[in-house]
Structures are given as structure tokens and as C-alpha cells.
Image (tube, grey):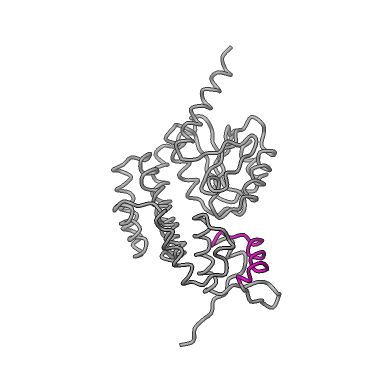
Amino acid sequence: MKTTHILFDIATVEREIGIGKDTLRVWEKRYGFPVPVRDEHDERLYPQPQIDQLRLIKRLLNHGLRPSKVVGLGIDELNEMLVSSRGHEHEYSEDILTLVDLIKTHQAQGLRLALSRQLLKQGLNDFLSKTITPLNQTVGEAWMRGEIRIFEEHLYSDQITNVLQSAISTLRDPTCSPRVLLTTLPGEEHSLGLLMAEATLSLEGASCVNLGVQTPIQEIVSAVAAHRSDVVVLSFSATMTAQQIKTGLQQTRLALPARVALWTGGSGIGKHRTTIEGVNLMGPLSDLSEAVLILRKNTKSLALP
């Protein structure tokens, strides 16, 4: 049987692995890796073996290793380094590992039922912090090691999205305050962080409008005016670079009315520790709950004669 050699363009590598285009080009020049082939338009294309190496390199960089120590190493060497670094990873409960097994064995209905049972057992707040947060981390680690494929990650995202949307629908009240608009900027395709934020805010009695992902800044401004929003929440995953996050937050802050608060969170924020004037950085989901309480307190104080 003839083997099909799949090639990935540089934009796909940046989106799926989380290593920026500029970084890939710098590594190619500095370390001699990756070694792309060129198409008829002289565009870079990367074969699957190099994608596997890049995935392992990304994982090791997340553990704090420097590019000079890992870029260009072979699969075997990278795997050995990853094994030695796993002592720093979290240990997960049997419940979490059972959910991961359902993902790996493609049991979509079983996964949804298991997640729904956990939600009923724990309540929404604990479900977010004690099940979804560690499960996201476990799935991410497994994906970086190549133990979970992209379609399996999508299966997980689809099921948890269904479960969270169903739970959030029971909490929606357009008469509540503050009025919060949630979205991501162009280039950020991950929506799960938005749903987790929306669920947390809804539990606190906020009125949420979730625009989904990749909303241009001017459209965010128009939506804020249409919904009379008090707060905009932006989510950034670890696939976004520090410069993308910083630039996006600066431009959004400048475009929004001064009265509208801008809150941001996600794994990208925690990793890059971006600080922008006029932007509130959120760590754990509990930060959102605290921010709602503070906003209400400050609003009440301003309303006093």
C-alpha cells in the first residue's frame, strides 16, 4: 500500500501546535530545524514527523526548557526528556482519568453522560473547578504527548460545550447586572474558556451575552453599544503569543468606552503574565466572582448621594 505523506502549512502548525510563524522561521535559521519543504509558491510545508517533534518541543518548552536545549533533537531524545520532566506534572483523580479514557475510546455519548452526572453530583461551581479545569489540563498534556489526536480533542470540546450550554441556559436572566459581553479576538479559536467564564458569571447573577470566537474589535464595540454592556471578557488560550495578547488587549482597551471594564483570562494570560493598563487580569475562575462583587460594590458607591 502506498503511504500518503501529509504536509502541513505554517499557519496550520501555528494554530494546532501553538508555535508562532516567526518562531518557526527563527528556529529554522538558528538551529536548522524544522526543515520544511517548499510548494510551487515557495511556501513552507511541514511533514508529519516534524509535526510530532514540534509537539514534543512545545511540551518541553512549557516545562521551562529553553529552545537551544530541545530544538532539533530527535523524537527519542525528546521523549526521554519529557519522561524525566513528568515528575512536575499533576496527579489526577480516577474520575478524571476515566473521562480521558472515554475521550480516547471515542465514546461521545458515554462522555456526555459521565460529564452530566458529575455536574449533577458536584454542582456547577465545583464541576468547573474540580472536573473541567483539571480535565482540560489532562487533555492538553495528552495531546502534546501525541496520546490524543485533534479529532478526539474536538469530540471532548463538543460534549463539554453541550453540557455547559445546557447548564447555563437555566441561569440566563437578561434583567440582571452587570451586563457582560464575552468573546475572543480574531486568531483565537478556542471557545471553552468563554463557556467556563460565562457559567461562573451566570452563577454570580450576571447577565451574559456570548458572541463566540474571533470577533473583530469594531464589532465588539458595536455589540457593547447594542447590549449596553458594562464589561467585556476576552479569553486567550496558550496558542496565542505574548505579543498577540498584548496588542489585542491594548487595541481593545483603546476602542472601548472608558466606562466599560475589560477583563481577560485563560491559559495564555497565565503563561505570559501580560499586564495592560486598564485591563483586569483573571487567574482562577474565582477571580471572576470576586470581580463581579467588587464591580457591584463600586457601582453602588457611585450611586449614593
Q: Nearer the viewer, residue 74 or 294?
A: 74
Is 191 positioned to the left or the right of 118 in the image? right
Q: Is residue 125 magenta?
A: no
Quadrant of image for the N terminus: bottom left
How many marks do you count on the picture? Answer: 0
Residue 108 percent location from the top left of the image: 36, 60
Residue drawn where x is 39% and y is 43% of the image: 129
Residue 223 percent location from the top left of the image: 61, 40
Is 98 positioned to the left or the right of 65 in the image? left
Please identify the dominant SS of the magenta region.
helix
Residue drawn where x is 55% and y is 18% of the image: 301
Is 176 positioned to the left or the right of 29 in the image? left
Vertical placement of residue 280 versus 266, above or below: above
Residue 115 percent location from the top left of the image: 33, 51
* Quarter assignment of residue 256: top right
Residue drawn where x is 30% and y is 43% of the image: 120
Residue 90 percent location from the top left of the image: 38, 51
Q: Is residue 22 magenta?
A: yes
In the rendered structure, which segment of residues is drawn in magenta?
Answer: 17-34
Is 189 positioned to the left or the right of 40 in the image? left
* Quarter assignment of residue 200: top left
**Residue farthest to the bottom?**
1
